[in-house]
Image (cartoon, rainbow, N blue to C red):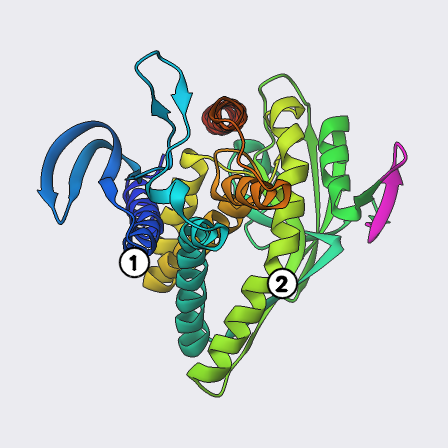
Amino acid sequence: MNGIGLLIYLAILIVSVVLHEFAHYITARAQGVKVHAFSVGMGPIVARRKWKGTEWRLSLLPIGGYVEIDGMVADARPDGKLERPKHGFSALSTRGKVAILFAGPLSNFLLAVGLLTAVYTTQGVQSVQTFNNRAEIYEIRGDGARNAGLQVGDVITRINGQVLPENETVDDAPRPGYRRVQDALQRGGLQTFTVQRGSNTLELSFTHIPAPGKLFGISYGPERQESVRRLSGVGEAALEATRFAVTSIPAAVQGFASAVSRVFIAPISENTGVVGPVTSSNIAGQLAQNSGIWGVLQFALLINLSLAILNLLPIPALDGGRILMALLERLRGKPFLPEQEGFVNFLGFAFLMLFMVAVLFRDVIGAFLRQ
């Protein structure tokens, strides 16, 4: 794991989550709802101080934070049964409840747009065009690839004399043509890659014998061609940033929905589209090393955009799930029983914990296998 990247990742995560929780806090206080506690960090409390009716906490684990809003959790009666609160959050109108719940994701979304505006204003809009019929080498990680003569930046245009297709169908499923590189390496034996290296075309012949745990040692994907478009000022940059953030939402939701099952059943080596702390730390470190502060800002805006979208998904225990519950209560004309609401939120929380454990497991094992 990249040490500097880990520090960058944790710093961005803490700032993003604290901003999220502070938006909940300030929106609740603006409506006269008491906030019992505000914690920076999770787990055991290291330090605490009472101020303006709220206990401000510093907790041991630097993985986020939380707020305890009055009236959001059911009260326990003397007989042990749960009772719906008649104060604080529970006493608000549907509009007031939704405002508090929506404030957190909105703050992350606005921060993402602000960071992207800064990037667009100073760096321009970078666009990447990909070509599935050409495979670009992104990273060399093994002796097999080095001995074959491959270098970072090489573009594979042919395999054994055959041009890579843009797309093809394999086992009744569509697949990009650059994946033929994987087929050749899994097949093994004598292979000849036609490679474009700058203005030169090379024929690289090598023998690869696949075996369990033996990796050829390349990170590759479709060829990428980057271009930069300069914008006229902050206003145009802000509009472009907002457009990008809004149009990214459907793809992000679809990607998360598709990743849910793959996280549990896909092979460890397969990219599910969801990364854990190890991969995130490595990405943060690489961006900081290659692009400096602007790379870190781009990583921060992606974290915040992801937090905004994830928290608005209609999953119980998340802000989106609680918003859905508030709207359903309005439609049915009466609140859910505390036991019903608690059970639904428990199921949502259990699913999220299981999902996070699966992502962490894949992340750690995948990093170990790549070494």
Residue 290 placement (x, y as % from top left): 39, 57
Magenta-span inclusion, residue 76: no
Left or right side of 206 for 244: left
Quarter occupied by residue 202 = bottom right
Q: Nearer the viewer, residue 10 or 206?
A: 10
The residue that appears at 39% across and 44% down in the rendered structure is 91
The residue that appears at 32% across and 56% down in the rendered structure is 31
Crowd around label 2: few <14 · some 14–19 · many ≥20 (10 Å): few
Residue assigned mark 1? 30
Q: Nearer the viewer, residue 67 or 97?
A: 97
Residue 223 disc label: none
Above-or-below relation of 125 to 137: below
Q: How many numbered callouts?
A: 2
Residue 119 placement (x, y as % from top left): 42, 70
* Residue 159 visible in the displayed image: no
Residues drawn in magenta: 164-173
Q: Judge depth for marks 2 and 1 and give the one in front.
A: 1
Q: Nearer the viewer, residue 364 or 69?
A: 69
Q: Nearer the viewer, residue 189 or 166?
A: 166
Residue 247 disc label: 2
Disc 1 marks a residue whose amino acid type is: Ala
Quarter occupied by residue 181 = top right
Above-or-below relation of 79 to 48: above
Disc 2 marks a residue whose amino acid type is: Thr
- Tell me the SS state at disc 2: helix
